[in-house]
Amino acid sequence: MIRSTVRFLDERSGGAPFLRKALRYVFPDHWSFLLGEVALYAFVVLVGTGIYLTLFFDPSTATTHYHGEYQPLHGLEMTHAYRSVVDISFKVKAGLLIRQTHHWAADVFVVAIVLHLLRIFFTGAFRKPRDLTYYLGLTMLALALLEGYLGYSLADDLLSGMGLAIGYSVLMSVPFVGANLAELVWGGPFPGTPAFWSRMYVAHVFLFPLLIATLLGAHLLLVAARHHTQFRGPRKTERKVVGVPTFPGQTPRSLGLMSAVTAVLFLLGGLVQINPIWLWGPYHVASGTNGAQPDWYLGWLIGALRLVPGFDVTIGHYTLVPNPFWGGALFPLVVFGFLWAFPWLERRFTGDHAFHNLLDRPRDAPWRTAIGAALFTWVALIFLAGSADRVFVTFFVSYGWQILFFRIAVWVVPVVVLLVTRRVCLELQVSERVERERRLAEEEARRAAAPEPVR
Amino acid sequence: MRALWRYLVAAVVLLLGRGRRPPRVERAERIVPAGEPSPRAELLVLALFGATAACAVAFVVVYAVESIPHQTQFLGLSLGVAFAFLAAALIVIAYRLVVTEELEEDYPVPAHPAEQEALGQLVEESGDRMTRKRLLLVGGGAAGAALGAALVTPALSLGPAFEIAPFFRTPWRRGVRLVDEDGRPLHAHDVLEETFYTAYPEGADREQLGAPIVVVRLRPAELHLPAGRDGWAPHGIVAYSKICTHAGCAVALYRKPTFPTVEPRPALVCPCHYSTFDPARGAKVLFGPAGRPLPQLPLFVGPSGELRAAGNLSGPVGPAWWGVRNRRPS
């Protein structure tokens, strides 16, 4: 049975030598190497649940009066888009499970990508020959953020409508061409023409998933072409990779991880409520609600939008830089731009153009670790600033004072973190060296004390 | 007939038997190292597979039986736990049933200098017949750019990219009545202090940024409207665009002075980024990221006490863009 299948495939594809090599491809073993895999499996769940949802979702802004299963919304005017999502939640059997699993999977997808990115950054895995792989990964992260934003905007509930208004304003704020771009995307001033919803829909269910899947394929091909990195260890060198083969060792592990990710996502989707749009109600231009928060992965942007003091840069009657540009567009561009440029910057400043298959521990590269920690702190503080309103409601700390604090802290704390992190790395290196020398000295002393072996 | 039948049977047997029993190849040495069997682990995996199947069946049952309450929760629980058991089974297989090997493999060679050289040579030599290479490249580039531009042009149909008049358009005109959410005219005596009202222009499309306004009543003595707005606030009633000038959200919060010593004045607040506007001073920005005050709508009280617009809004509504300060709304 096995032999005949193999024979069938080999005779038609000539792939036996390749397959044999692929099955014995070596995976170095470390828990942190699984983060990218988690993202991959979350993507698989996203595609699966997403296809199911398209079978019921109606991307139309034509309005209707609701008369469905959920009593509190009865008689309200809403779009068919919102109505169909409420129906998926209450009328379609298992619809709510799939919808919530889809939403949770999106959140987990981005968590996994970000953790994966942190691992890659702090271990120097982005160095030659894997910088191209790193750029593809960063691009996928940017696409994933946009894809998630499009996804929850489609539901046309109150929160998503507010989010779209903000997105529109950020696009409008692009100097010189913002209004023209926004008009193109929306088909006119906000809230745009009905065509806008079809555009969002086709982008969310086709263009972006296709782009992400294509980049994902290229990302994995490049990983395989250059093999995995590994931490230093016995027999592990720049020339030899040591680990478990694809088959039989790695296959059940990976499938097990995939099942575990799927398990967690379905458990979350079934047991932990997420985005109950029937509580928010339909969106109208004139409605808004307090305590509005986006999905976690856009928290850094809402924080940045809130932190910028109130001013537009104007020249006469001409508005050069409208306010939302700083927090909504420039800030993410700076963060992504810096991450994009980092492999090149590091090569430039260290003069290290060599190939690297062995990973650094964070302490081995103090400047890189310090810069990464500072950048992370900067983004994390701005993220926290985005939740200042919740802190105010929960702990009664004045919102205004919090914003004032963050406006200073986001510039001061990263610098402190930069210096402290670098110092900690250097101290760790020193203590390691001292320990090694002590052990060598002890050994020497022991050898000196021992009687000479008699020949 | 009988003989024919026998021939047929013989032929079929021969045909089926053909190629069977290939010469036994002497097994080369093992590829995957041998290991001890582990019956207990096998039993565990079997049990886990059984549990997976049971949970999967439970999922189908929950789906099929209407009378089971909390469908979503039980569906998620059964499916999630099924996958969890499957994960456990696979992990037991990985660590207890499959031989754990530690293999060494060479990293791929960093680069292929000879191949690189050959590739470069190949491309260069292929162009040997061309004498004006740079000119051809420029020509090809120009053709490509023009064609690219042509292919991108239909994208302009997406929207009126160069029309900026729509950004200045609002439905407000002198004499337009203010109506509430249910379409009833808003009267001056309906408008009380310490709260705010949302109003729309009568008969207009409400889903445009220029339509919704907030109406509040302040004590006339507290009003300090900008110059040139005398008479815009009959009885201390002021009206502003409800759309935040920062990021286009609805200014849906009214901060009334609950603790007058701390917050001396009422304020209009946007819940998206907490831009805060002073309704007594022409919606000047008190706090937050907004870069312009909310545009004000001049009001007058009609013969039967109803509120009416005395003109258009004082400036363009909504988020800022390059031309937002160029013109008054129309």
Image (tube, coloured by chain):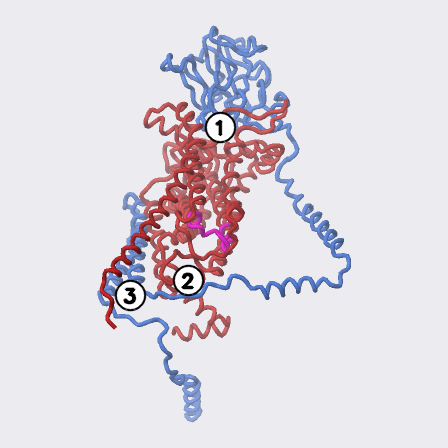
Is B223 left or right of B46, judged from the image as shown? Answer: right
- Which residue is under mark 1? A308
Figure quadrant of residue B189: top left
Q: What is the number of callouts on the image?
A: 3
- Which residue is under mark 2? A241
The residue lying toward the viewer, choosing from A137 and B298, is A137
Label 3: few (<14), some or many (≥20) within 10 Å?
Answer: many
The amino acid type of the residue labelled 2 equals Val
What color is chain A drawn in?
red
> What x and y, as percent, mark residue B293?
53, 20
Is B21 left or right of A153, judged from the image as shown? Answer: left
A164 versus A405 height, above or below? below
Q: Earlier in the sequence, mark 2 or mark 1?
A: 2
A16 versus B67 height, above or below? below
- The Cα atoms of the two marked residues, 2 and 1, are separated by 49 Å
Q: Which mark is residue A380?
A: none
Chain part drawn in magenta = A120-134
